[in-house]
């Protein structure tokens, strides 16, 4: 769940503190007049009390204790130290997605329609039940939900993965088999991956380039060969790419936690089980592939936007 509530809570404390102490000050002044206190006595009394919301030097006091006061600046600094990076990252991503939603024509009506579909799916008969169901999923309020739905709609439109998974997609997945035989070339950075991919497209030998470039010691000496492997064996981006390729087809660079892969499928084995027996499994496979594709497109979208961090405290925020 996002930590936007931190900034809201900070503002709320300051506002409520200022308002309540303004009322208290007015009430105290009225009392002093009624009791016939002299102007000097009233001034002395005010000097003895530091009210919340008043200034202490150049800083605003928001909490007063017998052990010392807490200023607004101290409070905000602590919030920045504890939550600043996470909140700022969320805000940057929200700005990017909001701008993209406007460009793509994602409307409030579109978002509301998705929320109503979700409510129906969850079987929530009241707002309270709906909120409880969302909170069980780590979504704290409607604002967070609307933001998540907006992001999802943007990524759906950017990737073209809109609508339900139809039977034809599942059947095509079944026809791609249960196992594939593949080889790959693993490199550390995108620039090198693009260079290797271009050389392959120019007709250079896959095995030779694997021996020259690949950082995978387990396959490099064997021309990048990984042998046969079943669905779900490899990391999701690799698995999704391998099972979407035709025999003899070479993928563009695929990013995973290990680096960048260029993959070629060389053979495949069909399912031993019937279509009906593995249909649900295949639907989930397609869904996971769509999610991986959306995640990749989201990162590409973030990388495309020019972001300049002005505050030195967060200058390394986007380095990872």
Image (cartoon, rainbow, N blue to C red):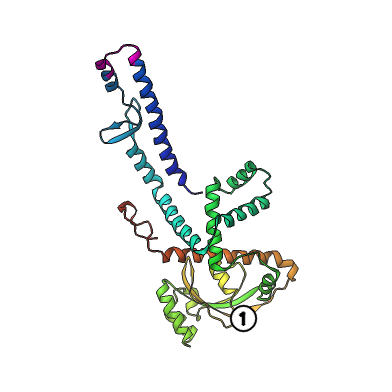
Is residue 106 inside the magenta stretch? no
Q: Which residues are magenta?
A: 32-42
150 lies left or right of 33: right
Using the image as rendered, state which of residue 312 and residue 16 is in the foreground. 16
Residue 204 coordinates in the image, percent (x, y): 46, 87
Residue at image location 68% in from the left, 65% down from the top? 281
Residue 110 coordinates in the image, percent (x, y): 58, 57
194 lies left or right of 120: left
- Dominant secondary structure of the residues highlighted in magenta in the image: helix
Residue at image location 26% in from the left, 20% down from the top? 43
Label 1, secondary structure: give it.
Answer: strand
164 lies left or right of 38: right
Q: Which residue is mark 1?
A: 267
Q: Is residue 235 visible?
A: no
Residue 86 coordinates in the image, percent (x, y): 43, 51
Is residue 36 inside the magenta stretch? yes
259 lies left or right of 277: left
Using the image as rendered, state which of residue 177 and residue 293 is in the foreground. 293
- Quadrant containing the C terminus is bottom left
């Amino acid at each position: 769940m996002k930590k936007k509530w931190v900034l809201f809570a900070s503002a709320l404390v300051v506002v409520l503190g200022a308002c309540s102490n303004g009322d208290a000050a007015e009430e105290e002044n009225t009392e002093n007049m009624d009791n016939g206190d002299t102007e000097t006595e009233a001034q002395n009394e005010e000097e003895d009390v530091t009210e919340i919301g008043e200034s202490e030097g150049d800083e605003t006091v928001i909490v007063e204790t017998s052990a010392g006061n807490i200023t607004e600046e101290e409070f905000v600094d602590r919030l920045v130290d504890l939550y600043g990076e996470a909140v700022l990252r969320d805000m940057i991503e929200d700005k990017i997605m909001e701008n993209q939603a406007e460009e793509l024509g994602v409307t409030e009506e579109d978002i509301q329609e998705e929320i109503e579909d979700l409510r129906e799916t969850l079987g929530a008969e009241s707002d309270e039940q709906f909120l409880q169901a969302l909170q069980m999923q780590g979504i704290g309020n409607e604002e967070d939900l609307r933001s998540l739905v907006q992001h999802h709609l943007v990524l759906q439109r950017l990737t073209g993965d809109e609508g339900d998974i139809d039977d034809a997609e599942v059947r095509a997945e079944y026809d791609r088999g249960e196992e594939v035989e593949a080889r790959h070339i693993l490199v550390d950075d995108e620039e090198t991956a693009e260079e290797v991919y271009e050389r392959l497209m120019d007709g250079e030998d896959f095995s030779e380039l694997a021996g020259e470039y690949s950082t995978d010691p387990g396959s490099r000496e064997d021309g990048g060969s990984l042998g046969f492997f079943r669905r779900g064996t490899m990391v999701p981006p690799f698995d999704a790419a391998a099972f979407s390729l035709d025999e003899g087809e070479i993928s563009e660079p695929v990013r995973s936690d290990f680096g960048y892969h260029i993959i070629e499928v060389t053979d495949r084995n069909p399912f031993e089980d019937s279509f009906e027996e593995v249909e649900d499994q295949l639907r989930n496979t397609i869904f996971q592939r769509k999610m991986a594709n959306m995640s990749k497109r989201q990162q590409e979208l973030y990388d495309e936007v020019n972001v300049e961090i002005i505050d030195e405290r967060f200058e390394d925020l986007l380095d990872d």
